[in-house]
Image: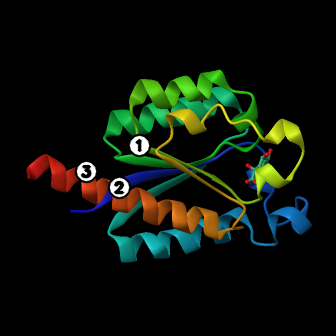
């Protein structure tokens, strides 16, 4: 059985490739999503990839994913990581197993990036490995779901 998973990109990530490439690299969002789709096939996951700049639209996307039965979330909340109780509540409220990912190492940057409202409700966080943060986040989430399903049927 394939795991339906939402990959959600937050604010300004639609500008990936042209936005501060020295920090975020030169791959576009479309190219990143394409790579993740390839990775998903190998992992037995089915991805929906979405991006939104607004907090409300991101909350709507998380609630939609839970409603349609997605099993987990790979989420780069962008700057909302450091500000949004509402996104934290959306993850806690839906109960979607979530891996928080960041392209840059947020702990090596400005101090306002050192706090995450999302991390306490995530199953894990990957930060600083560039685009690989997403790939590894997806792998970790699928491994978590495999473990979870095994425990349910054991
Ligand atoms: C980011 C890190 C955030 O601090 C920043 O606001 C972003 C991108 C990352 O992927 O490294 O927009 O989430």
Q: How far is disc 1 from disc 2 in space, using C-alphas?
A: 9 Å
Instruction: Characterize the local packing of mark 2: few (<14), some (14-19) or many (20 or more) Cα atoms within 10 angstroms.
Output: some
Q: Residue at 41% across / 53% down in the picture?
A: 5
Residue 98 to residue 60: above or below: below
Circles 1 and 2: CB atoms closer than 8 Å: yes
Say if 145 sits above or below 123 in the image: below
Secondary structure of residue under mark 3 = helix
Disc 3/disc 2 C-alpha distance (Å): 6 Å
Q: Residue 129 location in percent, x, y?
A: 69, 67
Q: Earlier in the sequence, mark 3 or mark 1?
A: 1
What residue does disc 2 label? 144
Q: Badge 3 local density, few (<14 within 10 Å), some, or many (20+)?
A: few
Q: Position of residue 7 (x, y in %)?
A: 53, 53
In-front residue for pair 122/108: 108
Could you say which disc has been placed on residue 97 in the image? Answer: 1
Label 1 Cα crowd, 10 Å radius (few <14 / some 14-19 / many 20+): many
Is 152 left or right of 147, judged from the image as shown?
A: left
Q: Secondary structure at mark 1?
A: loop
In the image, the residue with mark 2 has its CB under 8 Å from the nearest atom of ligand 1: no
Q: CA distance from mark 3 to mark 1?
A: 10 Å
Mark 3 CB near ligand 1 (8 Å cut): no
Q: Residue 87's spot in the image, x, y percent?
A: 60, 29
Label 3 with label 1: CB-CB less than 8 Å: yes
- For the point 27% across and 62% down, the residue is 2
Q: Are marks 3 and 2 in contact (CB under 8 Å)?
A: yes
Provide the secondary structure element on which disc 2 rests: helix
In the drawing, does residue 67 fall left or right of residue 29?
Answer: left
The residue under the point 68% across, 29% down is 55
Q: In this view of the protein, which residue sits in the foreground, 106 or 4?
A: 106
Label 3 belongs to which residue? 148
């Amino acid at each position: 059985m394939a795991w339906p998973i939402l990959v959600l990109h937050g604010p300004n990530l639609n500008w990936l490739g042209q936005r501060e490439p020295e920090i975020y690299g030169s791959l576009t969002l479309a190219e990143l999503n394409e790579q993740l789709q390839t990775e998903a096939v190998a992992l037995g996951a089915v991805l929906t990839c979405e991006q939104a700049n607004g907090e409300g639209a991101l909350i709507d996307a998380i609630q939609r994913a839970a409603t349609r039965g997605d099993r987990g979330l790979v989420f780069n909340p962008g700057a909302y990581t450091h500000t949004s109780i509402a996104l934290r509540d959306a993850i806690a409220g839906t109960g979607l197993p979530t891996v928080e990912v960041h392209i840059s190492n947020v702990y090596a940057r400005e101090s306002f990036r050192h706090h995450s409202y999302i991390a306490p409700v995530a199953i894990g966080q990957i930060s600083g490995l560039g685009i690989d943060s997403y790939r590894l986040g997806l792998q970790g989430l699928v491994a978590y779901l495999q473990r979870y399903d095994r425990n349910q049927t054991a």
